[in-house]
Amino acid sequence: MNITRFKDLEHRYADLKMGVVGDFCLDRYFEIDPTRTELSLETDLPVHNVASVRCQPGAAGTILNNLCALGIGSLYPIGVSGSDGEGYELRKVLSQRPGVSLDYFVTAQDRNTFTYSKPLLMHQGRPPEELSRLDFKNWTPTPEALQKTIADAVTNLAPQVDAMILLDQVDLADTGVISPMVLKAIASAIEKYPHLVILADSRRSLRGYPRVGFKMNRAEMARTVGIPENSSEELIKKAAEEIASAQNNPVFITLAEHGLIGAAPNQPASHVRALPLRGEIDIVGAGDSVMANLCAALASGSTVLEALELAAIASSLVIHQLGTTGTATMPQILDLGQSSGLISK
């Protein structure tokens, strides 16, 4: 990609309208001062003294963070929070993001707010050390009435946006936002609005999804198509080509340090190598930055190869941000893209 093409795509981002449908999470970071050590008088166990707390959207919210960083004009999260304190914090941080409307974000009395509580030991002169997380999740099926509310939101939003991202982040099927009822609403939207760009990602499997684009990592690809996780690059390319043709949509597979593979329907797959490491890394959120950049680029009219290049640069920027789930702006992507040779003059 050359800089003229980069600027052309970037210029379109401010006019894009995108929906993010999925499991929004509250990432709550507890920054612990390790110099303030003490033992509990009652239990004789170590006490971790928290110096500060910061909250940011996680899971589908991480995708939203990245879309905001890219300068997408209008963003519509479709998700659920509980009527608890964590839900208040999640809605607060979502509402502070530029261009975000919470018109389709639901508060449910009978659901916990999906929360990752992340204790961090803040060491001077070296990266934070993350301790064991404390999570809040829902382990019962999403109530049918709530499924319908979310499905109706998808139906109502579809004609208003250029693209949608679907993220299924839950460990147990049908306990989150992406349910069979919601997927049925997505399938109906595709029939009515065939030019709507939709990319889906699921940590379990994308089997049974309607004809949308897929983004998956190597392990998710193996579970979805039934090939070994350690398959060769050529076999993964072939699988991507077959899925893209079957879905009639682009398919993307992330390969960690081996880069990204993407395929459009009835076209040969492309492979973009990962950028070299430039120091210590934290891979949390890398896949979400890839998803955001792929969908934004496609919605702006990019080719699969162009989308892969932008996503590879963005993920390299994100993994070098320590102690947080990072994002990448377009100026940062341009700078690193030019220095790495992926964006030419």
Image: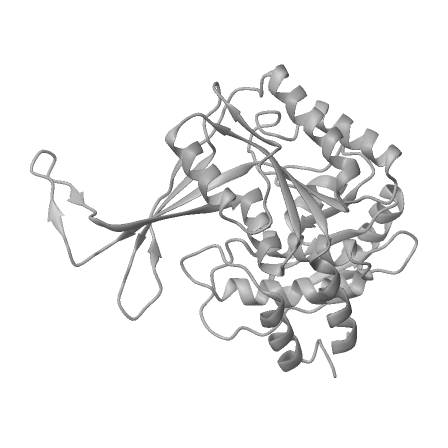
Q: Residue at x 85, y 52 (%)?
A: 241
Q: Residue lying furthest right in this view?
A: 266
Quarter of the image that includes the C terminus: bottom right
* Residue 257 visible in the shown view: no
Q: Nearer the viewer, residue 154 or 138?
A: 154
Q: In the picture, which quadrant includes the N terminus?
A: bottom right
The answer to which of 220 and 252 lies nearer the viewer is 252
- Residue 160 image point, x, y percent: 76, 39
| Res 222 quadrant in image | top right
Image: 262 above or below 53: below
Residue drawn at (61%, 27%), measured in percent from left and top?
Answer: 173
Q: Nearer the viewer, residue 296 or 235?
A: 296
Q: Is residue 271 above or below residue 166?
A: below
Q: Give the residue displayed 75% in from the left and 43% down from the top.
A: 161
**Residue drawn at x 69%, y 80% as measured from the top left:** 341
In the depicted view, which residue is nearer to us: 107 or 269? 107
Q: Is residue 322 above or below residue 132?
A: below
Q: Position of residue 290 (x, y in %)?
A: 64, 56
As drawn, is 157 to the left or to the right of 112? right
Residue 138 makes an appearance in the image: yes
Left or right: residue 171 compared with residue 136: right
What colouring method underlies this structural image? one colour
Q: What is the count of numbered marks?
A: 0
Q: Is residue 61 left or right of residue 334?
A: left
Question: Where does the image place residue 94, in percent across and percent down from the top left?
Answer: 51, 43
Q: Position of residue 13 (x, y in %)?
A: 71, 59
Query: Which residue sits furthest left?
Result: 41
